[in-house]
Image (tube, rainbow, N blue to C red):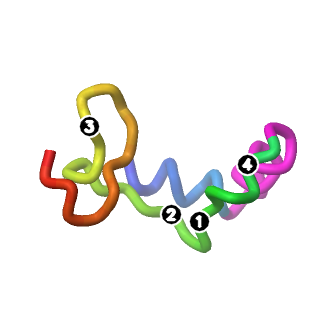
Amino acid sequence: MLKAFQELFDDGTYADVIVRYGLGDVTLPAPVFNVSSVTGAGEAQPPGAGG
């Protein structure tokens, strides 16, 4: 799955989505896929939130 995320960054799709939907305040410099940081609702938890 990380390879799929990497492709989104490499081909510019990630940047296009960020610009299209005005998500500049939540951009990532590189792909991050950490299943343990995602809640059941699919929302990222802040560091140290436990969950």
Q: Earlier in the sequence, mark 4 or mark 3?
A: 4
Asked if disc 4 and disc 3 are in contact, CB closer than 8 Å, the reply is: no
The residue under label 1 is which amino acid type? Leu
For this orientation, the residue located farthest to the top is: 41
User: Label 4, label 3: how many angstroms apart (C-alpha)?
Assistant: 20 Å
Asked if disc 4 and disc 2 are in contact, CB closer than 8 Å, the reply is: no
Q: Residue at x 68, y 63 (%)?
A: 10
Tell me residue 23's x, y (percent): 73, 48
Asked if disc 1 and disc 2 are in contact, CB closer than 8 Å, the reply is: yes
Circle 3 residue: 39
Q: Which of marks 1 and 4 is nearer the N terminus?
A: 4
Circle 4 residue: 23
Asked if disc 1 and disc 4 are in contact, CB closer than 8 Å, the reply is: no
Circle 1 residue: 28
**SS class of the residue under badge 2?**
loop
Total label count? 4
Circle 2 residue: 31
**Label 3 neighbour load within 10 Å: few <14, some 14-19, many 20+:** few
